[in-house]
């Protein structure tokens, strides 16, 4: 046997001493070449036993000429230059070096992040130009609490995440790999990653699927304040789209270590932009990483030529099977075992393709089947689900067994109704899927009110209910809800986006994907699966394979409609904007604010969207509709509004004061909604704008800027009118009550004390009942996504439990619930759930010994107040009995910053039993008038039928 020949095809280091040292045991001839073309490579490697490659392409033509080659080792994390399929066909291992520079690249990414966040290039150029702090660039924000999005989650991304956590950043990850959840890390889908990230860093391989993955559509979905970082592969990005995004300020800046063409051409627009920091593909480099790279690549050649399996072959399984007659090897290197199990993915830094063959047994082979219950829980775990709220039972025991073996935590609630409300609260705050679960029969039916509430408010939720064994269908089994007895699927069908029954285990993967597509795309909402106990125990093929992107039709828009809307806004004399809950669901508050500020458009929100524009903003008119402000009433119902921009509102009863005709604008209603069925349903829309509010508003802002080049905006008088109205009618009715020292305590004063005591970013949940009226009118919401009111169903008891779910989603935020004593008595046992899981929620209970909205509503109508009063309950003692802290509040000013601070520092769930004036009438006149009109119309219809 002759001397082994090893060829280094091309080399950027000038010498091969590290390679020679590693390969010395082989006694091989190691040759350093300077190949530039495939012909050069063929000439050198045709008789080589092993090849080390840096950049020159090794395609099929080259590989077919290789007579003896057993391994091609690539200097890097990918295998960009090598045609792997051709090598596999010839039985040649292709290896890479997966972890030689994780820390270096992670440090480079963090350097970009810090430089961009702190505007260091701006300061550097200013100082060099002789400007010493003359004008500080804006904005500069503290990193703590901002969101770093990672596309891919390989070792480099994991290293970035660890470093970023130390700076207080929240980590968002979009990846196919299985990720253990943690307090600062959550797994999100691709669109959520784009919308929520303040910094977005790429950590994925360059493949046919990921080439040009980030283009115009993706950059338009990002925040205008967001920064884009790429230290992975230049080909992942459409550079023309990135240059446009930076030039037109769709995003704030970028840090780039890689470009599509390196070195870049002088005409590359990215070189001309001050908002870009560039480095010449050096993120990987340190003297230590250089040595690790070269030694690791050479060691792979050494292993293969010694007859040992390589540690990091991207085609290990395929080549190993070829060499062993089609059978997988009984023992494989640890790195390869991980790769088979879907935990190490091909390519650089993250998303690639694990084979998904199933879980590995003790012999190194893969288990071909798993139980249906385990499949469901594994699927949810891979989606990033962290909690499942519910009450256990016999028919769903297989699911709980699977949860026990997973990273998902089950939250045992005191009632199934509390479970569905908690899943709702969790979803609203986290922006992720809420999951709740119950057993068959009454367990399932007890979920329905909370599910209906989520459906009315478009909250994404997965509802899993048990079912008796299919063998027992129609035989009168205990708690049966089959199609032949009660039909629980049909019950849920009317209050969910999808409801299905799993008759066969083999259909579960399809049903689960179908349900989640309905829950998470288009108009979101709850979905339901009924799972018979025998189906849950059956075996099905394989482990769950997550979809890269579930189908979505929500990101499109009608360009012509956008043009018409932009023209209408530019020609408006007295415009107004009404923001609904859909704006919050689409995370479009920033875009709505920018549009309003561009033309100083007065803005009102529906009660459900309270805070979408901070209520201390100069353009805010507060809420319109139920318990709305005098300012919003005067402006919107004046008959002067010519163009009304409606963002994500269906104009329901609560949002329109019972469909007031005067709300319709004189010229054009521009209605934005993701659901075409909502547009024009209650008021005719001159320009229907169907799609995600964030996408529509982004395109609208761009189109307005384009049209402003030739259209002069003439409207401005409306802002002066708004200012005059604000001083004349104000934002509050009877504002003096907010300072009242009278006893019993006025609810208006309570709301003022609460607002003064809670931080602006506290998460406040409001229950159904009179307390909602007081909070909607007198409690100012100072930031989007901080005020939560489920007005779709207006369920009492919602706020008690939903706040607990919110605390699971945001453990570091203050969470408060404003609730009446009636709502507390309906669902107050969930305080014990908060105690059990150490979730220190603050419940503020307005205690007046009655259902206040019913009592006062009947008084206004002149009806008897029968069945609306009850003996006052000592809510503080109830709380203490449940293990929480209970404090009675009687005096104005007792709720103050020092009390809230002391409660927060105690870390104990706390109930404030606030004794309010029971005779103070809530702001429900419009709601009562609407009911009265309804009664009158029904009486007229009945009379018409009699006469007919």
Image: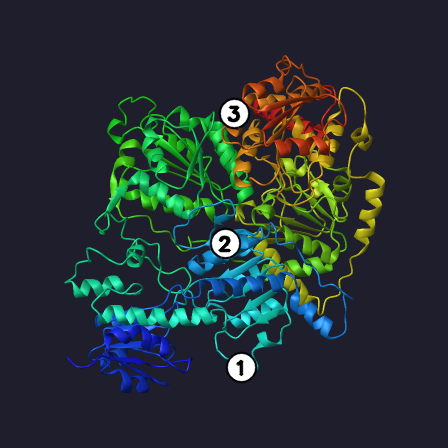
Q: Residues within 10 Å of mark 3 (few under 14, many from 20)?
A: many
Q: In which quarter of the image is the C terminus?
A: top right
Q: Position of residue 778 (x, y in %)?
A: 73, 34
| Residue at 21% across, 73% down | 90
Asked whether 111 or 623 is in front, the reply is 111
- Say which residue label 3 marks: 832
Q: Position of residue 37 (x, y in %)?
A: 35, 85
Label 3, label 2: how far apart the Cα atoms are: 35 Å
Tell me if 222 is positioned left or right of 752 in this view: left
For the question of whether residue 235 can be seen, the reply is no
The answer to the question of whether label 3 and label 2 lie on touching residues, with beta carbons closer than 8 A, is no
Quadrant occupied by the N terminus? bottom left
Q: Where is residue 870 in the image (x, y as percent from the top left)?
A: 63, 13
Write down the quadrant of residue 709 in the picture. bottom right
Q: Which residue is drawn at 61% across and 59% down?
A: 698
Local crowd size for mark 1, using a 10 Å CA cut-off: few (<14), some (14–19), many (≥20): few
The CA span between labels 1 and 2 is 36 Å
| Residue under label 1 | 265
- Labels 3, 1: front one: 3
Return the residue at label 2.
162
Q: Is mark 3 on a helix, strand or loop?
A: helix
Answer yes or no: is residue 606 visible.
yes
Return the residue nearer the eye: 471 or 944: 471
Q: Which of marks 3 and 2 is nearer the N terminus?
A: 2
Looking at the image, residue 869 lies above or below residue 320: above
- The secondary structure type at the circle numbered 2 is helix
| Circle 2 Cα neighbour tier, 10 Å, few/some/many (<14 / 14–19 / ≥20) | some
> Which is more N-terminal, label 1 or label 3?
1
Instruction: Please tell me which residue lies in front, 596 or 109.
Output: 109
The kind of secondary structure element at disc 1 is loop
**Residue 777's quadrant in the figure?**
top right
């Amino acid at each position: 046997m002759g001397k082994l020949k090893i060829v280094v095809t091309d080399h950027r280091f000038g010498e091969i001493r590290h390679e020679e040292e590693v390969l010395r045991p082989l006694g091989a001839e190691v040759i350093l070449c300077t190949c530039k073309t495939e012909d050069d490579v063929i000439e050198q490697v045709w008789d080589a036993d092993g090849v080390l490659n840096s950049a020159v392409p090794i395609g099929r033509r080259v590989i077919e000429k290789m007579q003896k080659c057993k391994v091609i080792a690539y200097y890097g994390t990918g295998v960009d230059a090598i045609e792997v399929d051709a090598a596999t066909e010839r039985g040649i291992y292709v290896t890479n070096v997966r972890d030689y520079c994780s820390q270096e690249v992670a440090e480079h990414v963090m350097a970009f992040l810090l430089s961009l966040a702190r505007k260091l290039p701006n300061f550097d150029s200013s100082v060099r130009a002789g400007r010493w702090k003359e004008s500080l660039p804006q904005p500069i924000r503290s990193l703590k609490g901002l969101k770093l999005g990672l596309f891919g989650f390989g070792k480099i991304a994991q290293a970035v995440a660890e470093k970023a956590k130390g700076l207080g950043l929240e980590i968002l990850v979009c990846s196919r790999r299985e990720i253990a959840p943690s307090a600062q890390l959550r797994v999100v889908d691709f669109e959520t990653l784009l919308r929520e990230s303040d910094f977005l860093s790429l950590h994925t391989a360059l493949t046919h699927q990921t080439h040009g993955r980030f283009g115009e559509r993706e950059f338009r979905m990002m925040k205008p304040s967001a920064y884009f970082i790429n230290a992975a592969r230049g080909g992942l990005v459409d550079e023309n789209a990135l240059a446009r995004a930076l030039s037109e300020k769709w995003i704030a800046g970028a840090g780039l270590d890689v470009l599509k063409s390196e070195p870049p051409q002088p005409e590359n627009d990215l070189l001309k932009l001050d908002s870009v920091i560039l480095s010449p593909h050096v993120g990987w480099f340190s003297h230590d990483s250089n040595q690790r790279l070269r030694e690791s690549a050479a060691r792979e050649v050494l292993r293969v030529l010694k007859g040992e399996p390589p540690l990091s072959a991207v085609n290990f399984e395929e080549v190993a099977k070829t060499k062993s007659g089609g059978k997988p090897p009984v023992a494989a290197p640890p790195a390869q075992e991980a790769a088979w199990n879907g935990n190490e993915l091909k390519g650089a830094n993250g998303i690639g393709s694990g084979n998904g063959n199933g879980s590995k047994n003790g012999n190194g082979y893969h288990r071909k089947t798993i139980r249906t219950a385990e499949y469901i829980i594994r699927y949810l775990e891979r989606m990033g689900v962290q909690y499942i709220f519910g009450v256990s039972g016999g028919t769903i025991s297989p699911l709980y067994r699977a949860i026990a073996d997973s990273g998902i935590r089950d939250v045992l609630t005191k009632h199934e109704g509390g479970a569905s409300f908690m899943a709702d609260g969790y979803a609203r705050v986290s922006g992720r899927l809420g999951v709740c679960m119950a057993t068959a029969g009454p367990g399932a039916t007890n979920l329905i009110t909370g599910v209906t509430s989520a459906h009315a408010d478009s909250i994404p939720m997965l509802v899993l209910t048990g079912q008796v064994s299919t063998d027992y269908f129609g035989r009168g089994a205990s708690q049966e809800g089959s199609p032949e007895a009660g039909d629980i699927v049909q019950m849920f069908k009317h209050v969910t986006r999808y409801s299905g029954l799993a008759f066969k285990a083999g259909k579960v993967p399809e049903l689960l994907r179908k349900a989640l597509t309905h829950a998470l795309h288009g108009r979101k909402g709850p979905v339901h699966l009924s799972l018979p106990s025998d189906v849950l125990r059956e075996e099905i093929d394989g482990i769950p394979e997550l979809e890269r992107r579930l189908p979505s039709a929500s990101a499109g828009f009608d360009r012509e409609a956008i043009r018409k809307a932009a023209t209408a806004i530019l020609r408006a004399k007295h415009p107004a904007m009404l923001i609904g809950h859909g704006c919050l669901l689409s995370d479009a508050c920033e875009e709505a604010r920018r549009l309003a500020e561009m033309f100083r458009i007065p803005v009102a929100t529906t009660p459900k969207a309270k805070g979408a524009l901070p209520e201390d903003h100069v353009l805010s008119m507060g809420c319109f509709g139920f318990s709305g402000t005098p300012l919003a009433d005067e402006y919107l119902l004046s008959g002067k509004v010519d163009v009304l921009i409606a963002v994500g509102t269906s104009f329901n009863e609560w949002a329109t004061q019972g469909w007031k005709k005067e709300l319709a604008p004189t010229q054009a209603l521009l209605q934005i909604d993701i659901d075409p069925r909502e547009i024009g349903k209650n008021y005719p829309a001159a320009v229907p704008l169907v799609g995600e509010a964030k996408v529509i508003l982004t395109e609208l802002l761009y189109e307005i800027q384009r049209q402003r080049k030739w259209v002069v905006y003439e409207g401005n008088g409306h802002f002066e009118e708004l200012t005059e109205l604000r001083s004349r009618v104000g934002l509050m009715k009877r504002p003096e009550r907010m300072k009242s020292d009278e006893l019993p305590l006025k609810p208006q004063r309570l709301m003022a004390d609460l607002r003064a005591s809670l931080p602006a970013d506290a998460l406040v949940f409001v229950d159904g009942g009179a307390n909602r009226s007081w909070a909607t009118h007198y409690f100012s919401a100072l930031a989007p996504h901080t005020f939560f009111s489920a007005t779709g169903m207006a369920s009492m008891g919602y706020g008690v439990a939903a706040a607990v779910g919110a605390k699971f989603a945001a453990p570091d935020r203050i969470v408060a619930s404003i609730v009446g004593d009636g709502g507390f008595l309906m669902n107050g046992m969930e305080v014990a759930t908060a105690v059990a899981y150490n979730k220190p929620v603050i419940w503020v209970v307005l205690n007046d010994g009655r259902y206040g909205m019913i009592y006062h509503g009947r008084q206004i109508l002149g009806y008897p107040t029968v069945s609306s009063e009850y003996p006052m309950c000592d809510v503080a003692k109830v709380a203490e009995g449940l293990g929480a802290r209970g404090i009675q509040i009687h005096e104005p000013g007792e709720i103050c910053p020092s009390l809230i601070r002391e409660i927060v520092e105690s870390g104990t769930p706390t109930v404030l039993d606030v004794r309010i004036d029971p005779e103070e009438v809530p702001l429900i006149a419009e709601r009562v008038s609407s009911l009265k009109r309804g009664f009158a119309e029904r009486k007229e219809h009945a009379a018409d039928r009699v006469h007919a």
